[in-house]
Amino acid sequence: MSFKPDFAWGAATSAYQIEGAAAIDGRGPSVWDRFCRQPGKVFEGHTGDVACDHYHRWPEDVALMREIGLKAYRFSLSWSRILPEGTGKVNEQGLAFYDRLVDALLEGGIDPWLTFFHWDYPLFLQRRGGWLNADSSKWFAEYSAVVVDRLSDRVTNWMTLNEPQCFIGLGHGTGMHAPGDQMDLPHVLVAVHNALLAHGRTVQVLRAQAKKTPHVGWAPTGDVAVPLTDDPADIAAAREAYWSIQPGSLWNQRWWADPVLTGKYPEIGCEAYGDALPVTTDEEMKIISSPIDFYGMNIYNGYFVRAGADGKPEHVMRQPGVPTSHFQWRVTPEALYWGPRWVHERYAKPIAITENGMASHDWVALDGAVHDPQRIDYVNRYLRQLKRAAESGVDVEGYFHWTLMDNFEWAEGYRYRFGLIHVDFETQKRTLKDSARWYSEVIKHNAENL
């Protein structure tokens, strides 16, 4: 058997992408509320004001999760729904919403996997400097403590940050995501450091205050270097490429992961970033490296690498016509073998695939169903590779399909559909896609039917 009997078969969402109810019941604004109102920032001016209206329709959504047969559900909390100004006064209505959701999940036999932060930073704190403010990690710890005090009698699986490479790199580097800043590298690296401190302080909060023993991780992202062949030279080259750090770029695993898992920024990153490095202290690095239990990985695709004449990594250009998703991401199933292998090999932590899935051309057919054979084939191929990783000795704890339902895809608005459930955004009607019913069988058989 390749996957454990208690394998966490799940699906994932995030608060801003599905909840809606952006300005009711005391919720404060986030950077995404403001960003969506800036002309040209989001496809066709779409916003998350209503999204999937999950805030009101959560009972139906939990019922659909049960129909699919999910064993686990990964979701994030809206920081500004709980603390409207980011710190200070707690919004009881916001906490009560998550109370009800957690209770319903547990009643339905679905294990909640909670993410503290999935990009929707409180606007009031952004106006005080956001991730550049030295107090930002303490603000985050205050928010985390409120959540842990309320929910840790029932929730045991926790993730601190989702894809820091994105909310820092795209939000503060390129400006493609909220808050839309375009900062120079020294300032971006300060934001990185403060976000990592927020992660570490939250781990400490969980260890000190959780009412049930917490199972703690996080969920970084990144494309995976895949060796072009099984030649040992190509494998070594792909490993080197995966752990490399390029000057000026945050798109890597190691600058983020080494501090968390080893307590030090990697030397190759210090060389790559040079004079842009922030000032750090030993005490801060101890906070950042507060021990975690598992390493979450958001993996969608990869790139192929071979050993050059000198043995150094060479990226292999993709051939014309290779399979791609609607988002134009290359279909690379091998990424779900090599990514977990690289991380498990380096850090010796259990792995959870916290996001994987594809955007497809989905619509309701004349027969009333949503037929998405490409998604079924995609997930099948990727899960076979994850199974291969598990069979080779990688400790894999769970798999969370991105996403449970079609939703607001950030700067792309509603034009890309990743869900197992089709959502008509005008009527809010939900329709299980063929892939949801296929995934149900995978869960039922613990993937032994692949």
Image: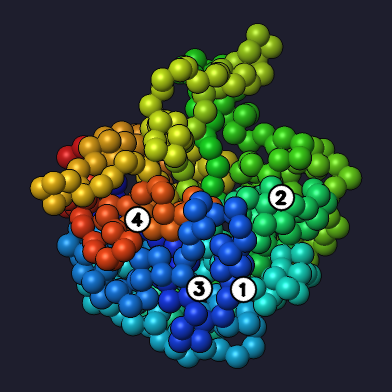
Distance from Cα at disc 2 to Cα at disc 4 = 28 Å
| Sequence-first disc among 4 and 3 | 3
In the rendered view, tell whether residue 402 sits above or below residue 318.
Answer: below
Q: Say which amino acid is labelled 3.
A: Ser
According to the picture, the residue beneath numbered tag 3 turns out to be: 78
Cα gap from disc 1 to disc 3, whole angstroms: 9 Å
Q: Is residue 310 left or right of residue 404?
A: right
Disc 1 designates what residue? 122
Cα–Cα span, label 1 and label 2: 19 Å
The answer to whether the residues at label 4 and label 3 have Cβ atoms under 8 Å apart is no
61 over 154 or under it: above or below: above
The answer to whether residue 283 is left or right of residue 7 is right
Q: Is 425 left, or right, of 283 in this rendering? A: left
Element on which disc 4 rests: loop
Label 4: how many Cα within 10 Å (few below 14, some 14–19, many 20+): many
Residue depicted at x 38% and y 43%: 359
Q: Which residue is mark 2?
A: 173
* Residue at which label 4 appears: 406
The residue shown at (41%, 54%) is 414
Badge 2 element: helix
Where residue 73 appears, x then y in whole percent?
Answer: 34, 63
